[in-house]
Amino acid sequence: MSEEENTEDDDWSNFASAGYGSAYDPWADLVPLEEVEEEEESEYDLELGELVVYSPPPSDDGLDNLVMMGACNHCIARLSGKPFNWEEIEKIGAELRDESINRGAKKDESVEYCPFCEDLFVDIESIAELVSNQLIKFEFSKLQLGAHFAKDQVVTEDDLRTQFGANGSQALKSAFNDALGTKLSSKLNDVTLVKEKPEVMLLIDTLTLEPTIELRSLYLYGRYRKLERGIPQTRWPCRSCKGRDGGCVSCDGTGQQYATSVQDLIGEPLRAAFDARDTAFHGMGREDIDVRCLGRGRPFVVEMKGPKRRYADLEEMAELVNSTSKGRIEISDLRHSRRSEVARIKGTDAEKSYTIRFLIHGEYDAEKVEETINSMEGVTLEQQTPQRVAHRRADKVRHRKVVSIENIITDESEIQMDVRVQSGTYVKELVHGDEGRTVPSIAGLLELDCEVTWLDVNDVHAD
Ligand SMILES: [Zn+2]
Ligand SMILES: [Zn+2]
């Protein structure tokens, strides 16, 4: 249920707090840089005395020193202060190394790994290969990268870069992002690297080289008409087993109280088509299980979670839903949406129009009934939380306006009318009065029992 209430949070920000930074710079805040408690002397400080006095790169001395320290080709180019591009960085680094060697620079043979990147860039091709082999299974075009680095490594690199790299050299994390992004772009056709609103997010743990791939939700907006009674809007866990442990006898092992729902009639065919993990359903309000929803239908946003496919003809998708639901529901106006629209859908207080049919128990005069019903037009109802929902709603009084009433039909046994009410009105109670909890009501004014036979939503006045 928190699924529905979590509408304000873009799940992007949840992922961000798991390791990605702001949309502006996904690398910021990845690793909190805490103050180093003591000024530790790096081994290079100690060796400085042995080195020839030099100026930093791009001077020859500075470049030679990078080679002597055991920097990899990537880091030589990155820290050289000379122009380079990510496609050719390895080659440019190798050329700079050769020039240094020709000047007589020798690598310190006791150094095992590049002190700047711990040979991360040496592995970049195999990381890209591994990741692209996984990503290629999914349909997407916008990718955002992030990486987790050990805090120590970031601190050490920052120190070394400041001491031995050219002024303004790119930091390790940002450079890793660019290097990997460049490799991936060449391997994955039609994929653009983005810093916000990605379809796929990739997080690399640089210690284990484990990639984490998150397929961002796909949102679709539409309107549904519910043509059959007895269908809840969303999945409803079985009352006996609460949907746990694979269901029980009373729910036939489904874990669900009802065989299907608007959510599943719409969501399941789409989930299969988009090869998604699950769905979430967000309606602009909801009708009771026994109420149909007709007219233009009720606006909704359906969310595909973890979709492996993203591209589809939405007209075909709507037809797919309509044909598989076999007349129980119908959708229209299907289009792409986004998470922020969920909040809009949930927050819109749309007036609703209903057709209500009800019985009056006891003797009545048709003319007086019609007069009474007409007198309800424009009144503000005082509605105490109805008994039928009291178990899940706070007991309070709400005020809701009856906007209009028309098309009153009185025949021998039943009354029918069209009524337009403010959002959030308990409309059955407007008729039967809920034992005096809704005032005024038709039953209360007539001083007769009224019983609602059926109810249809005719319009949700939104958009
Ligand atoms: Zn390196
Ligand atoms: Zn059950």
Image (cartoon, rainbow, N blue to C red):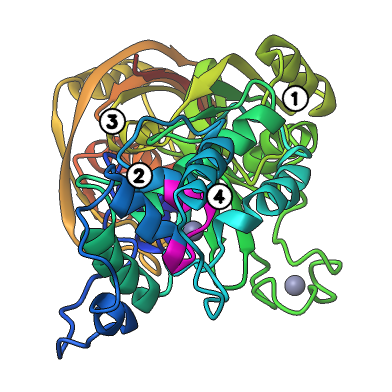
Secondary structure under tag 3 reads loop
Q: Are marks 2 and 4 in contact (CB under 8 Å)?
A: no
How many marks do you count on the picture? Answer: 4
Q: CA distance from mark 1 to mark 2?
A: 59 Å
Q: Is residue 324 visible?
A: yes
Q: Amino acid at mark 2?
A: Ser
Where ligand 2 lies, by image quadrant?
bottom right
Q: CA distance from mark 3 to mark 1?
A: 25 Å
Lower sequence index among marks 2 and 3:
2
- The residue to which callout 2 is attached is 80
Q: Which residues are magenta?
A: 68-76
Q: Position of residue 447 (x, y in %)?
A: 28, 43
- The residue to which callout 1 is attached is 321
Helix, strand or loop: magenta stretch: helix
Secondary structure under tag 4 reads strand
| Disc 2 versus disc 4: nearer the observer | 2
Direction from residue 238 to residue 223 in the image, left or right: left
